[in-house]
C-alpha cells in the first residue's frame, strides 16, 4: 500500500527545508504544498491548530509538527536507508544537544541582525558570530557534524546557509571571513543533491527580507 | 561490569528532577553531586562548557547536558520500563508536548515570577492559555503517558512541584481546580507516585527560595 506523504511548507523557511532535506535523503516521494503564511489555509490550521505554523508533515492523514521532531519521525519510519541519527546512544545525545543548540540560539539571534539597527544590531551581530564560531569549533576537522556521514546536526544547521547572504547584507558582516571552516562545510553539504535541491535561492531570500523589513518599518 | 552513573544537580532544580525521576523509574543506581550555582565546580564547567548548567548526567565518564537530551539518552540506553511509546507517530506526539512545555508553558510561568505589572499580567495570561491546551490533551487519560508515567509527564512534572509554591509566593492563581480539573487531578496523581514522591524537594524550602527570588526582582526595579 502506498504511503501518502504531504509537506505543508513555506519556500523560504529554513525549518521547512530541514524536512525537505530529510525526505530527500530517504528518497521519500511526497507532495509539497506551499503555504501563504499571511493567509493560512484551513488545512494548515486543522493540521497544526496549536502553533498554526509550518512545516507540517502529513503522513497517511496524520500530522507531525515541529521541524526537528519531524526529522526524527522520518528517521524512525524510513529507517532502512540513510540513517540521520547515529545508532550509539551517546552519539545520539551529542547530535540532539547540538541540534537543540542551533534551535535555541541561531534563529532569534539572526533575527536581531536583520530586524534591528544601531546598538541592538551590533550586539545581535556579535552574538550571532559567536554562536557560529561555537558551532565551527564543534565541527572541528570532521567533514560533517556527525563525523564521516551527513546527519541530524548538519540538517538542522545547513538550511540556515541560504539566509547567510541576507544576514551578511543587512548586518554588514562576512560569515566566510569569520567562519571559513563552517563555510567550507556548507559547500560540502551543498554537493549533496538532497541539500542543494532543498535550499531556497539566497537572492530570493534577500528580496523577501527586504520586503519584510519595509513592512516592519525598518527601511 | 559496573556502570558509573552520576547526576550533577541542585536540591531544587526542576530540570535536574526530571533526570532523577527518569533514573529512579528505571531503577538505575547513581551518585548525586550537588552543585552550588553561585560557585560552580570545575567538574561541572568541564562537563557542560557550553551552557554551564545543571543537570549533567555522567555515564561511564561521558557527560550529557540539557535535561530533555538526557531523558532521550536514558531512554536509548536503558530500554526497560520505556518512557516513550513504540509507535513513531505517538512518539512524535509525545515530543511535541514536551517541546510545548519548554517553549510555551515554562517561559510563561517563569515570567509570571520574574516580571511585574503589565508584563506579569501578560505572562500569567499566556500561562493560563497554555494550561487550557494541556487540559485538552489530558482528555480521556489520567497521565500524559496514558496509564503509566511517560516522558511527557516527567518533562511537565515541574508543574506539580512548583505551581502551588508559586501561587503562594505570587498570590496568583494558576491552576484552578474548577477551570482545570484534569490538570489538577494529574498534578495530584503525579505528586503521589512513590518514585516521584521520594525525591520531592521540601515545600517550605521551595517557598523560601522563590520568595527570595521574587523579592530580589522587585528590588532591582
Image (tube, rainbow, N blue to C red):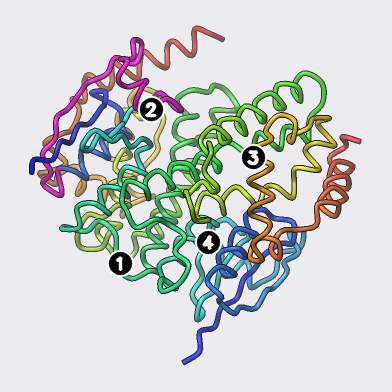
Mark closer to the observer (3, 2): 3
Q: Are marks 1 and 4 in contact (CB under 8 Å)?
A: no
Secondary structure, mark 4, is strand
- Reading the image, the residue beneath label 2 is B48
Secondary structure, mark 1, is loop
Mark closer to the observer (2, 1): 2
Mark closer to the observer (1, 3): 3
Point out which mark residue A182 bears. Answer: 3
Q: Position of residue A40 (x, y in %)?
A: 71, 64
- Magenta region: B24-53
**Which residue is painted at 46% across and 28% down in the image?**
B50
Q: Nearer the viewer, residue A19 or B83?
A: A19
- Give the crowd class for mark 2: few <14, some 14-19, many >=20 residues within 10 Å: some
How far is disc 2 from disc 1 in space, using C-alphas? Answer: 40 Å
How far is disc 1 from disc 4 in space, using C-alphas? Answer: 22 Å
Q: Position of residue B3 (x, y in %)?
A: 13, 40
Q: Position of residue B133 (x, y in %)?
A: 45, 54
- Give the crowd class for mark 1: few <14, some 14-19, many >=20 residues within 10 Å: few
Chain that bears disc 3: A
Q: Are the numbered discs 1 and 3 placed on the same chain, yes or no?
A: no
Q: Are the numbered discs 4 and 2 placed on the same chain, yes or no?
A: no
Amino acid at each position: 500500500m502506498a504511503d501518502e506523504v504531504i509537506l505543508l511548507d513555506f519556500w523560504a523557511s529554513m525549518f521547512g527545508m530541514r524536512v525537505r532535506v530529510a525526505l530527500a535523503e530517504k528518497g521519500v516521494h511526497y507532495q509539497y504544498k506551499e503555504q501563504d503564511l499571511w493567509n493560512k489555509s484551513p488545512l494548515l490550521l486543522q493540521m497544526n491548530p496549536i502553533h498554526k505554523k509550518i512545516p507540517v508533515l502529513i503522513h497517511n492523514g496524520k500530522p507531525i509538527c515541529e521541524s526537528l521532531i519531524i526529522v526524527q519521525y522520518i528517521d524512525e519510519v524510513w529507517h532502512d536507508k540513510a540513517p540521520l541519527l547515529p545508532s550509539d546512544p551517546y552519539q545520539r545525545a551529542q547530535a540532539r544537544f547540538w541540534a537543540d543548540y542551533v534551535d535555541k540560539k541561531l534563529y532569534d539571534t539572526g533575527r536581531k541582525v536583520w530586524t534591528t539597527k544601531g546598538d541592538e544590531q551590533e550586539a545581535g551581530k556579535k552574538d550571532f558570530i559567536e554562536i557560529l564560531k561555537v558551532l565551527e569549533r564543534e565541527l572541528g576537522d570532521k567533514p560533517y557534524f556527525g563525523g564521516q556521514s551527513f546527519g541530524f546536526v548538519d540538517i538542522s544547521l545547513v538550511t540556515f546557509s541560504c539566509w547567510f547572504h541576507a544576514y551578511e547584507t543587512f548586518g554588514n558582516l562576512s560569515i566566510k571571513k569569520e567562519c571559513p571552516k563552517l563555510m567550507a562545510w556548507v559547500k560540502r553539504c551543498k554537493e549533496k543533491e538532497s541539500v542543494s535541491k532543498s535550499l531556497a535561492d539566497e537572492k530570493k531570500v534577500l528580496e523577501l527580507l527586504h520586503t519584510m523589513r519595509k513592512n516592519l518599518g525598518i527601511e | 561490569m559496573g556502570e558509573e552513573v552520576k547526576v550533577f544537580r541542585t536540591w531544587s532544580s526542576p530540570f535536574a528532577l526530571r533526570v532523577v525521576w527518569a533514573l529512579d523509574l528505571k531503577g538505575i543506581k547513581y551518585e548525586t553531586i550537588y552543585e552550588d550555582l553561585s560557585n560552580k565546580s570545575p567538574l561541572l564547567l568541564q562537563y557542560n562548557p557550553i551552557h554551564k548548567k545543571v543537570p549533567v548526567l555522567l555515564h561511564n565518564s561521558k557527560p550529557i547536558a540539557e535535561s530533555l537530551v538526557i531523558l532521550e539518552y536514558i531512554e536509548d540506553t536503558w530500554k526497560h520500563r520505556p518512557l516513550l511509546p513504540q509507535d513513531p507517530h505517538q512518539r512524535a506526539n509525545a515530543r511535541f508536548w514536551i517541546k510545548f512545555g519548554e517553549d510555551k508553558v515554562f517561559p510563561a510561568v517563569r515570567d509570571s515570577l520574574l516580571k511585574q505589572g503589565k508584563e506579569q499580567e501578560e505572562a500569567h495570561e499566556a500561562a493560563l492559555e497554555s494550561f487550557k491546551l494541556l487540559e485538552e490533551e489530558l482528555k480521556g487519560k489520567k497521565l500524559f503517558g496514558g496509564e503509566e508515567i511517560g516522558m511527557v509527564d516527567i518533562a511537565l512534572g515541574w508543574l506539580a512541584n512548583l505551581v502551588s509554591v508559586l501561587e503562594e509566593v505570587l498570590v496568583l492563581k494558576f491552576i484552578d481546580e474548577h477551570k482545570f480539573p484534569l490538570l489538577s487531578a494529574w498534578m495530584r496523581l503525579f505528586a503521589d507516585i512513590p518514585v516521584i514522591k521520594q525525591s520531592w524537594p521540601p515545600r517550605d524550602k521551595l517557598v523560601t527560595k522563590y520568595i527570595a527570588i521574587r523579592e530580589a526582582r522587585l528590588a532591582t526595579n
